[in-house]
Amino acid sequence: GQQLNQSPQSMFIQEGEDVSMNCTSSSIFNTWLWYKQDPGEGPVLLIALYKAGELTSNGRLTAQFGITRKDSFLNISASIPSDVGIYFCAGSSTSYGKLTFGQGTILTVHP
Amino acid sequence: DSGVTQTPKHLITATGQRVTLRCSPRSGDLSVYWYQQSLDQGLQFLIQYYNGEERAKGNILERFSAQQFPDLHSELNLSSLELGDSALYFCASSLGLAGDNEQFFGPGTRLTVL
């Protein structure tokens, strides 16, 4: 079945640093979504990407839909303590909305 | 607040029992999805309903079933519970049927099977 490889698994950074994480797939996706999850909470949608090559920003977050449709990356600029959490990529490749999720990137920001 | 509500927040039960998890989608959304999150399997898609009809199935066990009612709320029924069913169960909703719709997640139900 489809698999998403998300890296890195965890990151420890200083406040103010930029962060980059990415996802690669063994198959093509038509939609890429990036979510953030806090402990005990549901995933919160950060950015949605629908076209190959698309680059989309949401405040300090920027994400891109890879040209091959098999990868996506998320950048966070000038990190702040509230950026702490688990970031997930998710892809959809069917006519229905089933999402395949990456394993998550645990982000820790030191003040 | 995503607009998706789930009840209960926590559920503790014993092996062999049956439980029902409830989800109300965002206003106007017709699709409801159920996902299971566990430490070893991550976030896994279980099932999707659109406007009352089952549309897609994922890694859902035969002991699990779901339905979407005319008012669009959905219930996930888990029966003959096993220890390994302990997990976070999330409901998500989207406006349409296809994968080009953004999915918004509820706060989840944490199920503990003792």
Image (cartoon, rainbow, N blue to C red):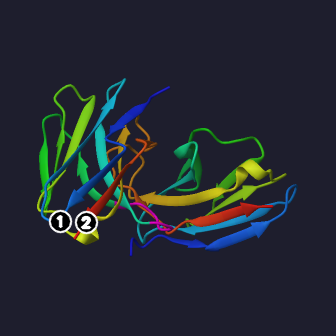
Q: Quadrant of residue B28?
A: bottom left
Mark carried by residue A15: 1
Please state, as top left, top right, bottom left or bottom right, where the N terminus of chain B lies in the image: bottom left
Along the horizontal axis of the image, is B48 left or right of B28?
right
Judging depth in this view, the residue of B72 and B88 nearest the camera is B88
Mark carried by residue B54: none
Residue B70 visible from this viewpoint? no
Judging depth in this view, the residue of A78 and A56 nearest the camera is A78
> Do tag 1 and tag 2 residues touch (Cβ < 8 Å)?
yes
Mark 2: amino acid: His
Residue drawn at (47%, 68%) of the image: A41
Q: Which residue is mark 2?
A: A110
Of the residues under marks 1 and 2, which one precedes in the sequence? 1
Q: Residues within 10 Å of mark 2 (few under 14, many from 20)?
A: some
The magenta span reads A39-44
Judging depth in this view, the residue of A94 and B89 nearest the camera is B89
Residue A21 visible from this viewpoint? yes
Residue drawn at (68%, 63%) of the image: B111
